[in-house]
Amino acid sequence: MRALLAAGVAVLAWALPAEAQQRILIASDSTAANYGADRYPQTGWGMMLKCGLAPDVEVINRAVGGRSTRTFISEGKWDALLAEARPGDVVLIQFGHNDASVSRPERYAPAATLYRDNLLRMIWESRGRGLIPVLVTPPARRSFDGARAKADFAAYSQVERELVASTNTPMIDLETRSLDLVSSAGEAGSKKYYLHYTAADKIAAFPNGIADDTHFSELGARAMANLVAQELKALKVPLAEKVLAERPDLNRAKPLGSFACC
């Protein structure tokens, strides 16, 4: 009965008029979050996603740094997102990096138990409001095992894949796609996607330099947003047709120097 109810809600949401289906909300962590100009070149992929979508799509980025499924819910951020959502909205749900923080018990959510339960809550509550939840596996860190980048959050991504099968929830496998991207660039070449700068680069946000293999540079965020857009285009959700076939803003070889879509 529960599955039938969920399916009925999903069908109802997807059948809404097109004008009600032009919004994407993002529930996530620092890898997707918004940053001010004073933090440039640090960029979240959620900031860049709009550059790969038709102009009439609004991206509402509610990603917050340092949050796991546990804290996103306990701090009321999930309820706040639901309160501003409207039927037909797509909700991209990407967590895992902070859920895996065993040393931070306030964040920690074991993959097979609390993380799974929290994602299930997000799925059912989204559908209960006529929204379209889409799971997003955590993006790759610049973490190599030989010639290939390795998945640091494999247990969390596996839970998401299982939920796809058990709840019929669409999923964007950002982990797999980003692992391929980082591996193709190589251990040295992939530094451009992350925050790797020295004092000599004279980056105002990082005057002493930085070596961060988790958070994205402008190029990295654009590349990750491109993967999200590409995967979204292949899903059977109404907004898929709003993903641009050509996304030059997300395929830049050199940074633009800002968060803009040129």
Image (spheres, grey):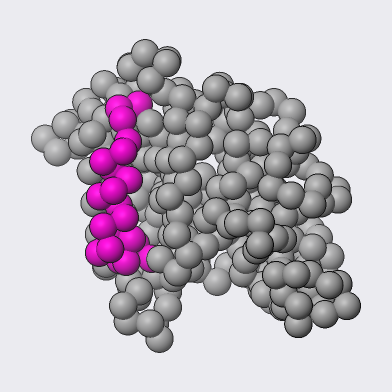
Quadrant location of the C terminus?
top right
Q: Is 135 a magenta residue? A: no
204 or 1: which is nearer to us?
A: 204
- Residue 131 placement, left or right of 96: left
- Magenta stretch: includes residue 81: yes
Asked whether residue 102 is in view, the answer is: yes
In the image: residue 178, left or right of residue 74: right
The residue located at (85%, 48%) in the rendering is: 253
Which residue is located at x 30 percent, y 66 percent?
70
Q: Position of residue 26 (x, y in %)?
A: 45, 46
Q: Main secondary structure of the magenta part?
A: helix
- Say if 90 sits above or below 81 in the image: above
Q: Quadrant of the N terminus?
A: top left
In the image: residue 217, left or right of residue 168: right
Of residues 159 and 91, the one nearer the viewer is 91
Read off the magenta span: 68-88
Q: At 50% from the left edge and 31% from the top edge, which residue is drawn?
A: 58
Against 176, residue 132 (above or below) is above
Residue 128 place in picture, x, y as percent: 20, 36
Asked which quadrant contains residue 215, the reply is bottom right
Say whether residue 157 is visible.
no
Q: In the rendering, at what x and y percent does residue 8 appear?
A: 22, 26
Look at the picture and state if 207 lies above or below 249.
Answer: below
In this rendered view, identify the residue nearer to me: 218 or 259: 259
Q: Quadrant of residue 233?
A: top right
In this view of the protein, which residue sits in the foreground, 97 or 85? 85
Among the 4 quarters of the image, the one containing residue 118: bottom left
Q: Residue furthest left?
A: 1
Q: Which residue: 26% across, 30% down?
A: 130
